[in-house]
Image (cartoon, grey):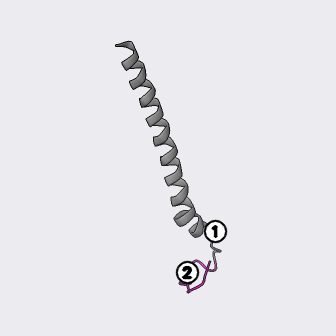
Amino acid sequence: MFLSIAILDSFILVLSGVLTISVLGLGLVVYNQFIHPVISRKESDRFIPVQTGDK
């Protein structure tokens, strides 16, 4: 009985760690793909439409 509780408890800890890492990774991807390019654009370029080949 105690062994099954210990296994379930450690499994929940592993799952919570995996969940934390995946949420942080998703947040990093969203920041790199969407938020950082908008923030890093210069103020003068903000209202010029994006052209093909722009970075």
Residue 49: say if magenta.
yes
Kindly give the residue lying farthest to the bottom in the view shown. Answer: 52
x and y, in percent, of residue 38 in the image: 57, 69
Q: Quadrant of the C terminus?
A: bottom right
**Range covered by the magenta-colored residues:** 44-55
Residue bearing mark 1: 40
Q: Are marks 1 and 2 in contact (CB under 8 Å)?
A: no
Residue bearing mark 2: 47
Q: Quadrant of the N terminus?
A: top left
Q: Residues within 10 Å of mark 2 (few under 14, many from 20)?
A: few
Q: Amino acid under label 2? A: Phe
Q: Looking at the magenta stretch, what is its main secondary structure? A: loop
Quadrant in the picture for residue 3? top left
Q: Which of marks 2 and 1 precedes in the sequence?
A: 1
- Please tell me which residue lies in front, 17 or 1: 1
Question: Going 64% across and 79% down the picture, which residue do you hit?
Answer: 44
Q: Amino acid under label 1? A: Ser
Vertical placement of 2 versus 37: above or below? Answer: above
Quadrant in the picture for residue 9? top left
Question: Going 48% across and 47% down the picture, which residue do you hit?
Answer: 23
x and y, in percent, of residue 43 in the image: 63, 75
Kindly give the residue lying farthest to the left in the view shown. Answer: 1
- Mark 1 vs mark 2: give the one in front: 1
Residue 10: say if magenta.
no
Question: Going 49% across and 41% down the picture, which residue do you hit?
Answer: 20
Tell me the SS state at disc 1: helix
Question: Going 58% across and 77% down the picture, which residue do you hit?
Answer: 46
Total numbered labels: 2
Q: CA distance from mark 1 to mark 2?
A: 13 Å
